[in-house]
Image: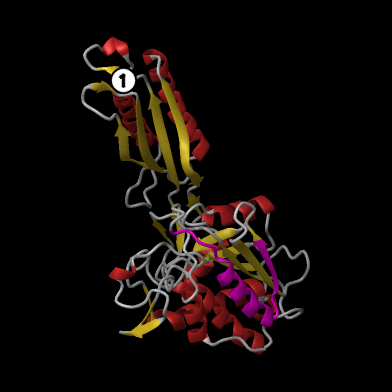
Amino acid sequence: MHTPNLIEMLSSLIGTPSVSATSPRWDMGNREVIDQLAGWLEKLGFAVQVTPLKTQPNKANLVAVLGGHPNCSNGGLVLAGHTDTVPFDDSRWQSDPFTLTERDQRFYGLGSADMKGFFALAIEAIKPMIEQRLLGEGRQDAPLIILATADEESSMDGARELVAADVAGARYAIIGEPTGLRPIRAHKGMMMEAVTVTGKSGHSSNPALGNNAIEAMHEVMTALLALRGELQSRYHHPGFHVPGPSMNFGCVHGGDNPNRICGECELHFDIRPIPGMELEVTRELIRQRLRPIAEQRRIDIGLRELMPGIPPFEEAANSELVKVVEALCGHPAETVGFATEASFLQQLGMQTLVLGPGHIDQAHQPDEFLGMDQIAPTVSLLQQLIQRFCCQTTSGSR
């Protein structure tokens, strides 16, 4: 068995571009990163499956399984993460984003914290356990699964396809997003929507010649703001810094000249739903508010998704996974405002937590880094979790 050491793995993963973005100018595949992980995990004895995304064959998910009895239903651990990164501006970096650079007790590079570094540290944790014969076929009671996805930073299509394919096999999942090794048991969701008002243009000297889309949009925005207030009164989660759902008007475009009646106007906005809110129910509430405006003004008002929604996520505070991880980390489980793939893994029936090295403050920023002080604690924590949830004979009965 030979796999690269930690520095070699970090260098290779960071040195392989895998940007995902809504803009075709930036978007690229992740297959090279997936193939690297597949090769390393196969050498360690994992059974590896690489599945291209249906709509984007240059992007793929990886599911790698090690050991465990067939049809095991009383344990198993998934270590999950995404293999893509956000776009970057290399002029704002002090070093090459695609070259692992060591300085100031930190490893710099695009994806070092968010979140290619997690995969390297997971493999680093697993290798000695295999060498000590704690892991492997016939040596553990429940499977250890490495899950690597595509497109988390844009569409989350990788996670969506995993849910559609009903990938399962374990009861517990850790998503290694950068949390400073503090467990996260809840986060808000995300909806990005567009309202398009299509009226009729005409000469501004006679309003009867047209149907002003901007005036109708004014009523739309008033109705949405009223709905926001109602949602914030109805839904409240004290665990979040902003305890209710938010709604932000991000941009609005309409019209072309002061002396023309505006024929079309479009508003883009987002909603951050809290746990307990269903995306389609929220979307239907918006439609209900728009219909009377369209009917009264005899104007066309359309609502569409700018991106598939990300459901909010919450793991019960008294779940086994939360209690075990809190005890191991020495920190109570917290909540965050950013969204992850956690809700999708939860849909597969797994208790799920977000927990990984690095800090979200470094993610999506120039000079992204992973602190060296995070390495040993991460490896130790992952080994303890693997023993607890995969190696029943080692960790005792559950």
Instruction: Report the label total.
Output: 1
**Left or right for 72, reference 396:** right
Is 307 one of the magenta-colored residues? Answer: no
Q: Residue 91: where, in percent of width, then height?
A: 29, 69
Q: Is residue 395 visible?
A: no
Q: Residue 349: where, in percent of width, then height?
A: 63, 54
Q: Range of the magenta residues?
A: 26-51
Vertical position of residue 156 compared to residue 16: above or below: above
| Location of residue 181 (image quadrant) | bottom left
Vertical position of residue 76 compared to residue 352: above or below: below
Q: Residue 188: where, in percent of width, then height?
A: 43, 50
Amino acid bearing label 1: Asn
Where's the N terminus, which quadrant?
bottom right
Task: Read off the residue under disc 1.
Answer: 212
Residue sitting at 77 percent across and 79 percent down?
A: 138
Is 40 one of the magenta-colored residues? Answer: yes
Vertical position of residue 165 compared to residue 99: above or below: above
Q: Residue 386: where, in percent of width, then height?
A: 60, 75
**33 and 316: which one is in front?**
33
**Left or right for 219, reference 280:** left
Vertical position of residue 196 compared to residue 373: above or below: above
Kindly state the secondary structure of the residue where label 1 is placed: loop
Where's the C terminus, which quadrant?
bottom right
Q: Is residue 298 visible?
A: yes
**396 and 122: which one is in front?**
122
Residue sitting at 64 percent across and 74 percent down?
A: 38
